[in-house]
Amino acid sequence: MAVSSSHSIRTCFQIKAKSPSFNLEKRVFGLPVLQHGVSFIGKKLKAKVGTKVEAVQVDLEGSESLADLKGLERALELDVVSERELRQKGFLGLRKTKLVCTIGPACSSLEDLEKLVLGGMNVARLNMCHNTREWHRDVIRKIKKLNEEKGCSVSIMIDTEGSQIHVVDHGEPSSLKVQEDSIWLFTPEKFEGSLPFTVQANYEGFSEGIKVGDELVIDGGMARFEVIERIGSDLRCKCTDPGLFLPHAKFSFWRDGKLVERNYELPTLSTKDWSDIEFGISEGIDFIAMSFVNDAESVRHLKDYLTTKSLKSIRVLAKIESLEALQKLEEIIDASDGVMIARVDLGVEIPLEQIPTVQEEITQVCRQLNKPVIVASQLLESMIEYPTPTRAEVADVSEAVRQYADALMLAGESAIGSFGQKALSVLQMTSSRMEIWSREENRQDLLHLRKLGVSLPDRIAEQICNSAVGMANNLAVDAIFVYTKHGHMASLLSRNRPNPPIFAFTNDKSTRMALNLHWGVTPLLVDLADDMESNISSTIDLIKSKGYVKDGDTVLVVSDVTPTHSTPMAFQSIQVKTIA
């Protein structure tokens, strides 16, 4: 049996109304609270935890010896990849940056998916722009099969197509080389296949407001054209900067060095998007990434819809890929459950040299607002064709990790590339090495975190988690354990980017899958009892019995204790336990 000595810092609180209008049904972390005051158990220490919360020390005591391990055989599911990494590298060797892979024709077989899963993929992304509904269903069921049969825990994300008003297509299955001074016709007219030097626009009004002399830019600069003639809704253009013209390419118009901004007044989610969302709900996906989000209201609308239509909790990620989204950045992030920085599409609308600083700004705002952020697009673009990345690409990946992005994403590298598994390996190795450097440089404290909590319960939870991470770093504990129903306290711990890994114990499958996207969090699905102290002691015993911890390891435990008849007050506690 695992026997642990422990020190505890505990807040025990009851709240009463300051005025007759106070709502006596107000709940703290889902629990009813009654009378005013903060009480403390034990002997006061000099240290204080946050505002009006004093640290206390309790006597050292061994956890109750358990007569039979069979009594502890409740479910404890740690995914096989984290388990392998933990055994090989120990607590501090666990990779904290999460990895997202786009699934496409190059990696959709069960064998290839298994290689990606065992290679460290945390989230599988399905781009609804491509492939059939049946193809997507088949991939989803293969991933769920791997999760069930191989002991994996890979979350599933669908990425909506969006209105596609900024897309043009030359009709060829692969990229074309555009020659300088060649003349091309851009038209909204629909036709099958391809026509020489003719490009089809997806939106009838794509040329509205465009003048002769304006510049048409493909995929942020892959090729450039000058508008030389308007013919109704069509545009005749001359190539001024030759390059590659990809299928389904994004385009933008520029005038005098500035983006031509136009309000198309189209909904963020198209009819097809809503159909894809219904499909995702029926298949039990975990995340929906919304394309071309330009305001917070569209995010809230989708979240409200999911609340009424889905039995499980599906998180909504806002893709930041337009100038309009940048102008409303904070309100969009605040409304969403997370963000994807779509750098290619964003690079179509802002100058390329601004992308690095915009990426860092979005990453910092997400961390301030406690929302996970994915850095996406062209991380290892050369590996679509080549087995090794450029050194510049590795530096780009390292910079995203240095900025403490929650996740990195492969797009074409895994979906259509010849070396998807190698690209995933590069992300894994580079992020792990950069995390070690960041820890040695003690960079996690460089960003001053704003206060988020408004209500007293939220402020207490935030202060507890902030203090817990400070303690964990200063005491050099091996790991942080947190017991959470909806993942909020786990996310608050992750927001502080602690040195030790965070193990989040939850009995909610949706929470487990959502935490796959949070930096440094390893979610475990467990059966939790009403008595939190029993949960702590029994899970530590289980973990030791499985060999995940050893004698002498120190863990910091953050928990909220559910009130019982014997302990009618709600407790928030920080405990430091040494495994013995």
Image (cartoon, rainbow, N blue to C red):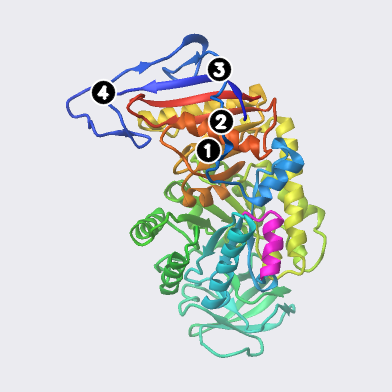
Which residue does the numbered mark 1 point to in the structure image? 71
Q: Earlier in the sequence, mark 4 or mark 1?
A: 4
CA distance for labels 3 and 2: 18 Å
Which residue does the numbered mark 3 point to in the structure image? 61
Secondary structure beneath label 2: loop
- Is residue 253 among the parts visible in the rendering? no
CA distance for labels 3 and 1: 22 Å
State left or right for residue 472 relative to residue 282: right
CA distance for labels 1 and 2: 8 Å
Point out the stretch of residues depicted in magenta: 110-122
Q: Earlier in the sequence, mark 3 or mark 2?
A: 3
Which residue does the numbered mark 2 point to in the structure image? 67
Q: Quadrant of the N terminus?
A: top right
Say which of 40 and 382 sits in front: 40
Q: Residues within 10 Å of mark 2 (few under 14, many from 20)?
A: few
Q: Quadrant of the C terminus?
A: top right
Magenta: main secondary structure: helix
Relative image position of residue 346 (x, y in whole percent)? 58, 59
Camera-side mark, 3 or 4:
3
Q: Residues within 10 Å of mark 1 (few under 14, many from 20)?
A: few
* Residue ID at (70%, 79%): 174
Secondary structure beneath label 3: loop
Q: Residues within 10 Å of mark 3 (few under 14, many from 20)?
A: few
Label 1 is placed on what type of residue?
Gly
* Residue ID at (58%, 37%): 69
Residue 16: mark: 4
Q: Earlier in the sequence, mark 2 or mark 4?
A: 4
Q: Earlier in the sequence, mark 3 or mark 4?
A: 4
Label 3 is placed on what type of residue?
Glu
Relative image position of residue 562 (x, y in whole percent)? 39, 32
